[in-house]
Image (cartoon, rainbow, N blue to C red):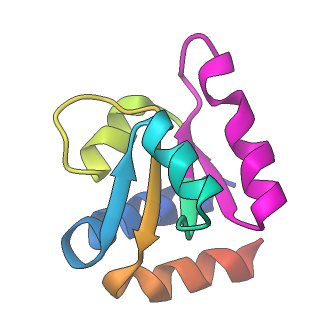
């Protein structure tokens, strides 16, 4: 799992410049429901945990890879924002396709 966390952060960094990402739980939820999300990352340190509890279930329903990362700060930094974020969805992989393929194989 930890290996996937590093890979998803790498994929988000690549996708933010060459593809498209959605930041924040509301945006991530919408992307999942519309079937736009390719990969979703959520932070483990979200308080209260109810904020992100529905995300793994939604992802499972839609067959989307969902990866937990340690902190909101880590996720925010990967997404290129100066604040932490509870969730990020990659909607267009751009050049992150290879990294994402590696993650889905690792599962």
> Is residue 58 rendered magenta in the image?
yes
Tell whether 67 sits left or right of 6.
right
Q: Is residue 1 above or below residue 11?
A: above
On the image, which quarter does residue 35 sit in? bottom right
Q: Is residue 75 above or below residue 36?
A: above
Tell whether 66 sits left or right of 29.
right
**The furthest residue to the front:** 34
Tell whether 53 sits left or right of 38.
right
On the image, which quarter does residue 13 sit in? bottom left
Q: Which residues are magenta?
A: 41-69
Tell whether 81 sits left or right of 14.
left
Residue at 72% across / 29% down in the picture?
53
The spot of residue 85 in percent (x, y) is 37, 33
Residue at 81% across / 56% down in the picture?
60
**The furthest residue to the top:** 48
The spot of residue 65 in percent (x, y) is 68, 64
Q: Is residue 104 above or below residue 82?
A: below
The spot of residue 58 in percent (x, y) is 75, 48
The spot of residue 10 in percent (x, y) is 38, 65
| Depth check, front residue: 73 or 19 | 19
Residue at 53% across / 78% down in the picture?
100
Check the picture and name the quadrant holding the N terminus: bottom right
> Is residue 45 rendered magenta in the image?
yes
On the image, which quarter does residue 63 sit in? bottom right
Residue at 77% across / 71% down in the picture?
107
Q: How many marks?
A: 0
């Amino acid at each position: 799992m930890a290996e996937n966390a590093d890979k998803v952060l790498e994929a988000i960094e690549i996708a933010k410049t060459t593809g498209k990402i959605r930041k924040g739980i509301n945006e991530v939820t919408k992307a999942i429901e519309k079937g736009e999300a390719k990969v979703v990352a959520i932070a483990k340190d979200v308080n209260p945990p109810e904020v992100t509890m529905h995300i793994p279930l939604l992802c499972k329903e839609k067959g989307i890879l969902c990866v937990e990362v340690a902190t909101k700060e880590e996720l925010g930094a990967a997404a290129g924002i100066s604040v932490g974020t509870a969730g990020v969805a990659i909607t267009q992989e751009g050049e992150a396709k290879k990294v994402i393929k590696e993650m889905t194989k690792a599962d």
